[in-house]
């Protein structure tokens, strides 16, 4: 369970949001909404612990994420605007290294299966630099498939994805929620997960 | 969950950085070629008087090594910063200091170690004697990791800043002066018949000190830069 109480954040001198509180329980999906520059990314990065909030507290399973430290970090997966994949490596190497770093190393066969499910069959060993934007995004999203993290923090996961991949993502999120996982995300596109009520958090 | 051990993390990060460097060999070679070129320029510029060259050799090699190691500092974190992988690295469950230490080690293997290996060949250009060459290699072997570690701190601080490449040199070069003095001093002592041991011991002390502090300080600097 993720509890946020009285969270305030600023970017430089400019205050973005103040006194934000919400609770995200197991199996819940939350969309952070707001105009450009309203602090959606800042909120997500604060939840990851990259940014120290001005005020307020973030608690994970009842304990402050500052005290939990590494334990919390191994329980979350963050996907930002940047794909966090290396051009010089191929899709398989990228997936194996990034998942090993986040604490759950996977075998070649598991990684290949994940990439194939993301629609990258036949491109597993292509250098990432020859892939298209959408395909790179799929490589980045494949991390979600092999991760064992409970909390997914996704910043604009649907950018550059085609209709088929968006459907795939909706399915993935649905599965994760079904396993008592939690997802908090931002998007300007429509993302609907069948059978799950979407909670919305508006930043203004 | 099969979590990585600390040693596993270190070897994973080193292997990753070495693989990346092998796919972009030009970056490694530029440092090495720069070093060779700068050292080779001196005999051409100051003339071929062998006594003078022999006296200058330790200083020339050390200054060149210092400048060459500055060249590659900009790349230590910036590539990972730009494609977002550094952000993911901040999320490793283990300590960030260990990760930074692994990156420093990989950086040294790619930019410091080649200099150490080629230095004796360059020393021959200056007619250095056998024992002096050994001391030169030993001093570089102890000193270049210190340069990488101090450099990592500078690189982490200037991450994402415009003109960071030049700034990092200005920031780091003054901090490297002690290494330069004792590194070159060790070789000079040897050529003038004095024991190089005190100089080498001091270099060793710098190495231990920076091993203790710089990974942690650089990790904090990275966190600040990523906010």
Image (spheres, grey):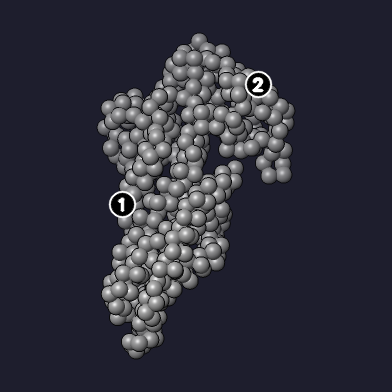
**B136 left or right of B100 in image:** left
Q: Nearer the viewer, residue B200 or A148?
A: B200
Identified at 51% across, 67% down, the residue is B178
Which chain letter matches label 1? B
Q: Residue A107: which quarter of the image?
A: top left
Q: Is residue B157 above or below residue A116?
A: below
Q: Secondary structure at mark 2?
A: strand
Which chain letter matches label 2? A
Q: Secondary structure at mark 1?
A: helix
Q: Is residue B3 above or below residue A15?
A: above
Between the residue at mark 1 and the residue at mark 2, the CA separation in whole angstroms equals 47 Å
Residue A122: percent from left, percent from top: 26, 32
Q: Is residue A5 visible?
A: yes
**A92 left or right of A161 in image:** left
Q: Nearer the viewer, residue B133 or A182?
A: B133
Q: Is residue B79 visible?
A: no
Q: Which residue is mark 1?
A: B22
Name the mark on residue A126. Answer: none
- Locate the N terminus of chain B by quadrant: top left
Name the mark on residue A22. Answer: 2
Residue A114: percent from left, percent from top: 34, 26
Identified at 51% across, 24% down, the residue is A151
Q: Nearer the viewer, residue A204 or A45?
A: A45
Residue A193: percent from left, percent from top: 50, 16
Residue A136: percent from left, percent from top: 39, 37
Q: Residues within 10 Å of mark 2 (few under 14, many from 20)?
A: few
């Amino acid at each position: 369970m993720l509890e946020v109480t009285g969270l305030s954040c600023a970017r430089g001198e400019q205050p973005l949001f103040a006194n934000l509180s919400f609770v995200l329980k197991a199996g819940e999906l939350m969309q952070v909404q707001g105009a450009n520059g309203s602090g959606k990314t800042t909120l997500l990065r604060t939840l990851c612990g990259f940014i120290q909030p001005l005020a307020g507290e973030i608690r994970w399973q009842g304990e402050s994420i500052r005290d939990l430290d590494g334990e919390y970090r191994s329980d979350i997966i963050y996907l930002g605007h940047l794909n966090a994949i290396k051009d010089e490596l191929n899709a398989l190497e990228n997936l194996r290294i990034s998942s090993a770093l986040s604490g759950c190393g996977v075998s070649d066969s598991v990684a290949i299966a994940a990439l194939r499910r993301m629609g990258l069959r036949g491109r597993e060993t292509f250098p990432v630099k020859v892939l298209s934007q959408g395909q790179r995004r799929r490589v980045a999203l494949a991390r979600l498939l092999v991760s064992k993290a409970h909390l997914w923090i996704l910043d604009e996961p649907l950018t550059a994805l085609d209709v088929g991949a968006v459907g795939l993502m909706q399915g993935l999120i649905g599965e994760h929620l079904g396993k008592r996982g939690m997802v908090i995300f931002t998007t300007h596109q429509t993302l609907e997960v069948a059978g799950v009520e979407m909670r919305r958090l508006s930043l203004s | 969950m099969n979590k990585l051990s600390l040693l596993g993390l270190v070897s994973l990060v080193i292997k990753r950085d070495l693989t990346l460097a092998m796919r972009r060999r030009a970056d490694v070679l530029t440092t090495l070629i720069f070093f060779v070129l700068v050292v080779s320029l001196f005999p051409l510029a100051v003339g071929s008087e062998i006594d003078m060259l022999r006296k200058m050799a330790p200083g020339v090699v050390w200054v060149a090594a210092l400048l060459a190691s500055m060249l590659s500092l900009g790349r230590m974190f910036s590539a990972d910063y730009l494609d977002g992988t550094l952000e993911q690295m901040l999320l490793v469950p283990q300590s960030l200091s260990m990760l930074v230490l692994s990156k420093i080690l990989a950086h040294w293997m790619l930019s410091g170690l080649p200099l150490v290996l080629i230095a004796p060949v360059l020393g021959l250009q200056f007619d250095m004697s056998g024992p002096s060459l050994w001391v030169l290699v030993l001093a570089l072997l102890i000193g270049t990791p210190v340069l990488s570690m101090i450099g990592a701190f500078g690189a982490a601080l200037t991450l994402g800043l415009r003109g960071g490449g030049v700034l990092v040199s200005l920031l780091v070069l003054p901090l490297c002066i002690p290494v330069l003095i004792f590194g070159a001093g060790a070789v000079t002592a040897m050529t003038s018949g004095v024991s190089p041991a005190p100089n080498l011991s001091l270099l060793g002390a710098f190495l231990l000190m920076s091993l203790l502090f710089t990974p942690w300080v650089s990790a904090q600097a990275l966190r600040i830069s990523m906010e």
